[in-house]
Image: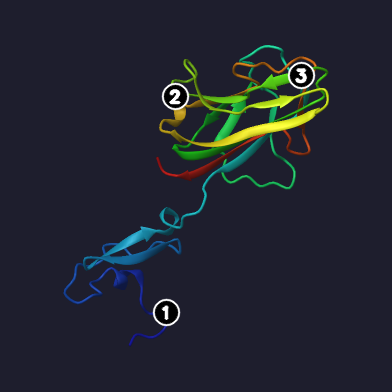
Amino acid sequence: TPSDGTVTNAKLAQDIISGETALAVAPADTDEFLVSDAGTLKRIDYSLIKGGISSAQEFRLQADQAGSGSTETVLTNWGENNTDYQAIGSAWSQSSGIFSCSSTGIYLCTFRIVISGASGNDAYDPSVDISTDSGSNYNTRATAWEYVSTTDTGASCGGTFMFDVATAGTFRLKFKQSDANDIGTTSTIKGDASQSETNIVFVRLGDT
């Protein structure tokens, strides 16, 4: 039995299982461990198997704004949450309302739009569109429906869907006020820099 502290990396590199293939290189640090694969010792990087969510981010509309009165208008005044919040990773970024992703994978998206103050009846259908060719072409991936009136002056709607970012460099996403029914100019789309009203969340579920 060797004394404590006497087994060096050089000794570990020898055949330590009788009759089996030796490990070529000992573990480099505490982020690695050894497993036996059909009698062959192999070095495994713990970070590759520890699991857990590797990416989760929330963005929210930074201030109130009036409806555009036209369809296909993209929401642009986004900022990442900064209140009692800690993102996991930094895969998502946005510019002028166009979101880009730097990491491939299967993602879960949750979106919500909050409306108030209509002076007339207002039906609307916010949607999220995705593109796989750097924004040259978009397809509507998810749509929600809601209605606000002069007697019911506040409403919110949204949805949840999964999607695949197969090629990070060419993937784009945008959140539109409406698809077929515009939000009228007398309706207010609620946003706030200190709390989440109109918002969108991305969570990476796993590999593509």
**Kind of residue at disc 3:** Asn
Q: Quadrant of the C terminus?
A: top left
Task: Give the residue displayed 46% in from the left and 55% down from the top.
Answer: 51
**Kind of residue at disc 2:** Thr
Could you say which quadrant of the image residue 93 lies in?
top right
* Residue farthest to the bottom, as pictured: 1
* Residue farthest to the top, as pictured: 70
In the figure, 73 relative to 5: above or below?
A: above
Q: Residue 13's x, y, as percent?
A: 28, 68
Task: Give the residue displayed 38% in from the left and 80% down from the top.
Answer: 6
In the figure, 135 relative to 205: above or below?
A: above
Q: CA distance from mark 2 to mark 1?
A: 55 Å
Visual colour scheme: rainbow
Q: Residue 117's x, y, as percent?
A: 82, 24
Q: Residue 105's x, y, as percent?
A: 44, 39
Q: Which circle, 2 or 1, is nearer the viewer?
A: 2
Circle number at residue 173:
none
Could you say which quadrant of the image residue 83 lies in?
top right
Considering the numbered disc 2 on the image, is that residue within a helix, a strand or a loop?
A: loop
Task: Give the residue displayed 58% in from the left and 46% down from the top.
Answer: 88
| Residue linked to disc 1 | 5
**Kind of residue at disc 1:** Gly
Q: Residue 204's x, y, as percent?
A: 51, 43
Of 204 and 41, nearer the camera is: 204
Could you say which quadrant of the image residue 195 lies in?
top right
| Residue linked to disc 3 | 121
Looking at the image, tell me whether mark 2 or mark 1 is earlier in sequence order. 1
